Amino acid sequence: MGLLDSLFGTDAASSEDLETLLQLIRDAGSMPEIRNIDQYINPQARLVVKACEQIGRLAARGIIGIPDIPRLLQAARGTNGHVEGSMAQALANMGPRVIPHLIKLLDAPDEIARVAAAALGFLGADALPQLEAVVRSDNRARRKMAIGAISIMRSTGMPTLVQLLGDPDQDVRLKAAIGIAHQVSTESSVESHEFAPGSQALLSALENPDLRVSESAAFGLGLLGGSALAKGMLRLPYEEMFDGITDDRLLEQPAAEIADDLEALTYPSPEVRRSAAWRLGEFGDPIAIPFLFQTVLDDPDQTPRAAKMWALWRLAKTRYII
């Protein structure tokens, strides 16, 4: 039996093999190309994921445990999302007893906190009460990590995410909307997005009189795009929204900063389009409404599309009572 067979056999690995598995992960993590290359087209990345999966089996069998957590997390640093996700699953395989230890790591350096948050998400309902307690705290970094964990829980975490659409912190609201959109994307096809429970929650939130809630829901629908976004756009007050935006008004020369952002809505760069939409929404000039309306549905990229829907909704909501 070769070394790889002994390491990756379903029941072959033991606690003595843990250091070999961790060293394999650390060695691969030192290679720059491992960070951005998909495991399915990179044999080295796939080998690292298999090592994490084997560590997960050791954890599920109780061969490794809480004292080994620091070594596992340190080994995953500097790798990629596939490796981090596999290591998070390995940690979750230790069961609910690991939850208090992972909660403490939510304000660790980002690479470690991400893995801890993902592991808490994989633990599901067992971890939800402690994550909700973190969300209610004043620590912004920990709150955002906790929301990321809750977003992984699918239907279990949905009520919490919907509630967070009304949080005073804009970053938290948008992260909750992103979490809901992520759940919809992973649980349904693009064609059926509009019928998913998460989409229905976002559509219902559009009716909330609190602008913080409704604009965050609009952002989430923008992330989803397709029929879910189109259904959200039907909630806009078309006649009132365009009232006063005449042909003469459109022909007027807008302020320089507005003109630049209107033009940037169709630039090739998704980041440029996103930033322009965000500024237009915050600036509040209704002249942007027809330009946003014309470009939002056809924008092929999630983040600029979401920013456009957020800006469009915000301009309509602040100008008129929907």
Image (cartoon, rainbow, N blue to C red):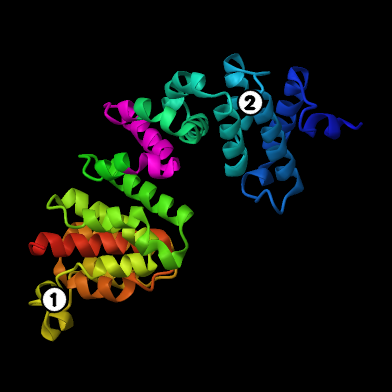
171 up-or-down from 322: above or below: above
Where does the image place residue 140, in percent across and percent down from the top left?
31, 32
Q: Residue furthest bottom?
A: 247
Q: Verify whether residue 134 appears in magenta.
A: yes
The residue at 49%/34% (across/down) is: 114
The residue at 33%/27% (across/down) is: 134
The residue at 67%/44% (across/down) is: 34
Where does the image place residue 102, in percent across and percent down from the top left?
47, 23
The residue at 20%/49% (across/down) is: 213
User: Does 226 sit left or right of 64 as displayed?
Assistant: left
Where does the image place residue 39, in percent across and percent down from the top left?
68, 48
Q: Secondary structure at mark 1?
A: helix
Query: What's under tag 2, amino acid-wise?
Result: Ala
Q: Verify whether residue 141 appears in magenta.
A: yes
Q: Which of 22 and 274 lies nearest the eye of the viewer?
A: 22
Region in magenta: 132-158
Give the residue at mark 1: 242
Q: Which numbered marker is on residue 60?
A: 2
203 up-or-down from 120: above or below: below
Label 1 crowd bin: few (<14), some (14–19), many (20+), radius 10 Å: some
Q: Which numbered marker is on residue 144?
A: none
Q: State the CA–CA distance, disc 2 to disc 1.
A: 59 Å
Q: Earlier in the sequence, mark 2 or mark 1?
A: 2
Q: Quadrant location of the N terminus?
A: top right
Where does the image place residue 67, in percent across and percent down from the top left?
59, 14
Determine whether label 2 and label 1 are within 8 Å by CB.
no
